[in-house]
Image: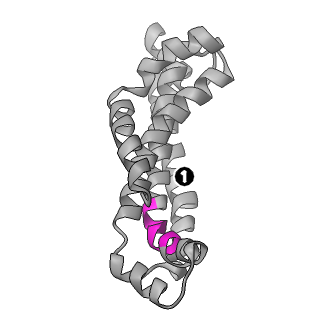
């Protein structure tokens, strides 16, 4: 967000990779890395990284020039600008990026498990669907939602409360 060269380079790539559903990468990743943990982590990484990068980049770009000019007028160097202006002002966007990254990664994990795993919640839902066990499918869906709700309630809200004291007014 701070470097226009980096932004000019990364923005088209982020747009390109965000347009490709993360699960579309799963077969290629599984061919290269096999079925297992590494493949699932890579699919999650691809799902989460690009939306997070765009959100954080937009957050940094939204920082008002007046705040930066005021800090520079007071003698702030690049590190002080980063620590006292850019970081505190971008924290809400970083938290939003973490939320988006988690939800995209979580969805990709479940989808990857549905097509290429022999365990996990996605596998349980997929297997339940294949054998016609609606209670197994419903249980899997409830567990997927419950885990997402727990992450929101106990992780992301705590992060928000922690950075509230840094929030730029």
Magenta part of the protein: which range? Answer: 86-93
At 59% across and 25% down in the image, what residue appears? Answer: 40
Residue 133 lies in the magenta-colored region: no
Front-most of residues 3 and 39: 3
Q: Is residue 14 above or below residue 86?
A: above
Is residue 19 in view from this perspective? yes
Above or below residue 167? Residue 14 is above
Of all residues, the one furthest to the right in this rendering is 37
Left or right relative to 29: residue 66? left
Could you tell me which secondary element the residue under label 1 belongs to?
Answer: helix
Q: Quadrant of residue 169?
A: bottom left
Image coordinates of residue 44 in percent, x first then y, are 54, 32
Q: Is any part of residue 145 visible from this angle?
A: no
Identified at 61% across, 30% down, the residue is: 41
* Residue wearing tag 1: 151
Local crowd size for mark 1, using a 10 Å CA cut-off: few (<14), some (14–19), many (≥20): some
Residue 35: percent from the left, percent from the top?
63, 13
Which quarter of the rendering shows the N terminus? bottom left
Along the line of sight, the residue nearer the viewer: 22 or 82: 82
Q: Position of residue 164 (x, y in %)?
A: 50, 77
Residue at image coords 44%, 14%: 129
Q: Is residue 123 above or below residue 56?
A: above
């Amino acid at each position: 967000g701070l470097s226009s060269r980096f932004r000019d380079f990364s923005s088209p790539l982020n747009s390109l990779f965000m347009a490709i559903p993360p699960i579309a990468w799963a077969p290629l990743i599984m061919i290269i890395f096999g079925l297992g943990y590494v493949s699932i982590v890579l699919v999650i990484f691809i799902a989460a990284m690009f939306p997070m990068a765009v959100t954080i980049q937009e957050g940094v770009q939204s920082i008002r020039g007046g705040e930066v000019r005021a800090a520079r007028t007071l003698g702030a160097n690049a590190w002080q600008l980063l620590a006292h202006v850019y970081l505190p002002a971008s924290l809400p966007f970083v938290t939003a990026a973490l939320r988006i990254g988690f939800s995209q990664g979580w969805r990709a994990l479940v989808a990857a498990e549905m097509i290429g795993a022999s365990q996990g919640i996605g596998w349980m839902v997929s297997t339940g669907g294949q054998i016609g066990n609606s209670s197994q499918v419903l249980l899997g869906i409830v567990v997927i939602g419950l885990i997402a709700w727990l992450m929101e309630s106990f992780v992301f809200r705590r992060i928000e409360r922690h950075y509230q004291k840094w929030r730029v007014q």
